[in-house]
Image: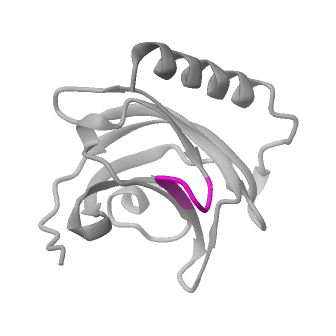
Amino acid sequence: MSVTRMFGCSLVAVLAMGCSSGSVSPRFSGFAYSSVTPQCGPADGPAVAIYLAPTQAGANDPSAPYVRVYVSVWVTQLAGVWPISTNSQAGAWFQPDASTNEVAESGYMFVSSVDSDNTVTGSVDLQFPNAGHIKTAFRAKFRPSNILCG
């Protein structure tokens, strides 16, 4: 992706998040803890998941409620804007309890930086059918995983 295109996409996403007319769901606005971990991507390629949760335990060992944002790239390639939709390279799910989940209808994840230790800094602005609008900043520490794909 060219620098000009990345800047343009970033500017559009930032403006869209800043101009959002919906209010953030008060029930699900406290996602203060986060982590990022490797996942299996399409055809066993690279992917990562960012977990956002109201507790440290929920972010490190997902226990509801939490939000999971999935992108099928290496963690080192996350910087930029990721549109969230049902037919994009990135998706998001909300897990309100142990037995139910819902897919985000729309939104964005903006990743401002990925540090040398793979800590990811950014924000999400997501719209869910039942949970409503979830918008939060995050600084997700990398958690290695022994995940076996295939």
Task: Tell me, yes or no, whether the highlighted magenta stretch contains residue 86.
Answer: yes
What kind of colouring is applied to the model shown? one colour
Looking at the magenta stretch, what is its main secondary structure? loop
Q: Considering depth in this image, is 12 or 4 the residue closer to the camera?
A: 4
Residue 138 picture location, percent across and down? 47, 36
Q: Outermost residue, bottom direction?
A: 99
- The number of numbered badges drawn on the structure is 0
Residue 147 picture location, percent across and down? 17, 69
Q: Which of the 4 quarters of the picture holds residue 38? A: bottom left
Task: Tell me, yes or no, whether the highlighted magenta stretch contains residue 75.
Answer: no
Q: Considering depth in this image, is 105 or 89 the residue closer to the camera?
A: 89
Q: Residue at x 71, y 59 (%)?
A: 105
Q: Residue at x 57, y 25 (%)?
A: 9
**90 w.r.t. 139: above or below:** below
Q: Which of the 4 quarters of the picture holds residue 19? A: top right
**109 w.r.t. 99: above or below:** above
Q: Considering depth in this image, is 106 or 125 the residue closer to the camera?
A: 106
Q: Residue at x 78, y 67 (%)?
A: 130
In this picture, residue 52 sits left or right of residue 132: left
Quadrant housing the C terminus:
bottom left
**43 w.r.t. 47: above or below:** below
Q: Outermost residue, right direction?
A: 21
In this picture, residue 115 sits left or right of residue 17: left
Residue 67 picture location, percent across and down? 53, 58
**40 w.r.t. 81: above or below:** below
Quadrant housing the N terminus:
top left
Residue 121 picture location, percent across and down? 40, 30
Q: Which residues are magenta?
A: 85-92
Q: Which of the 4 quarters of the picture holds residue 65? A: bottom right
Q: Residue at x 41, y 47 (%)?
A: 34
